[in-house]
Image (tube, grey):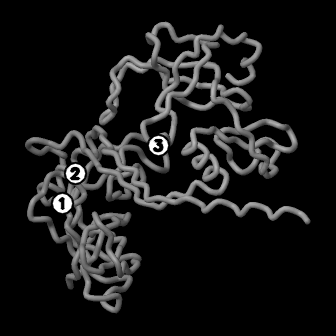
Amino acid sequence: MAPTPASPPEVLHAPLVVEFPFTRSLGPVQSAFLTGLRERTVIGVRTEAGDVLVPPVEYDPATAAELRELVEVGATGTVTTWAWNPEPRAGQPLTTPFAWVLVRLDGADTALLHALDAPGPEAVRTGLRVRIRWAAERSGAITDIACFEPYESDPATEHRPHDGRFDEPVTGIVAPARLDYTYSPGRAQTRYLQGLSERRTVGERCPSCTKVYVPPRGACPTCGVATTDQVEVGPRGTVTTYCIVNIKAKGLAIEVPYVYAHIALDGAGLALHGRIAGIPYDEVRMGLRVEPVWSEDGRYPDHYRPTGEPDADYDTYKELL
């Protein structure tokens, strides 16, 4: 009687947040645009063909010529297209349902994306006349426009030159970037993570080229075939190459300098990343034999330390650099 095959492991999943502040400096055009918003003034830029772009750009999208001719456009405009947002998310312009709209401001030839405060989708249409609702407190950011609101007025095409000069101009911005999602490593990496919880490192062998991938990917990226044959590798390995880190990472309780290395575990077909400790940073070298030191909860190697073995011969790991 054939043995009953083991049931596949439950695939792991967990919430994951990727968040960082995006900091950038501003050139004269973007500086004038954002500073203008702080002062309740909308500024665009004229292209070589005479079109007025809002938001402005620093180079002509058609000719790549540098653009510097600034013009002031109106705070009223026309909806060119829209989409209803029934469930606003955190950080969006409004907390109640609203419409995302593209608005061509009077005097502009392009449209600006923002939110429209409307009681429902039936109140929104292409061609709707709107105006800017300015934020009560403004700092020189796109959020200085709190939103648009319906406003009956006749379209205007007038615009006037602007020198872009303001007191205390905005010269840089910090825009927080955040992505919330649920991450699932898949079956192959689920088995890999479950192996780590048992202080084992498990890869998968390609049935075609026989390379053992650690961490496993479920398929061989070279041969394009599934990898289902599990192989335990290590725990010892060889430093193939490394770098010395001299900049302390925020929230990381590791003193600099320290070494981060590629480590080819015995039996693996490619190297993985790991921190080297237990040896002065300037004594780490290619070919150094190392072994894992597990975290207190035993879920992953905290770092690798020298085993005391002789260094590996270069020919044994040169294909894994």
- For label 3, the crowd category at 10 Å Cα-Cα, with few meaning under 14, some 14 to 19 and many 20 or more, is few
Kindly check if marks 2 and 3 are in contact, taking CB atoms under 8 A apart as contact. Answer: no
Q: Dot 2: what SS?
A: helix
- For label 2, the crowd category at 10 Å Cα-Cα, with few meaning under 14, some 14 to 19 and many 20 or more, is many
* Amino acid on which the number 1 mark rests in the picture: Asp
> Which x, y percent locates residue 100?
35, 74
Residue 72 falls left or right of residue 205: left
* Amino acid on which the number 2 mark rests in the picture: Leu
- The residue tagged 1 is 144
Q: Dot 1: what SS?
A: helix
Name the residue rendered at 34%, 92% in the picture.
122
> Is residue 97 shown above or below 51?
below
- The residue tagged 2 is 34
Q: Earlier in the sequence, mark 1 or mark 2?
A: 2
> Which x, y percent locates residue 209?
85, 38
Q: Earlier in the sequence, mark 2 or mark 3?
A: 2
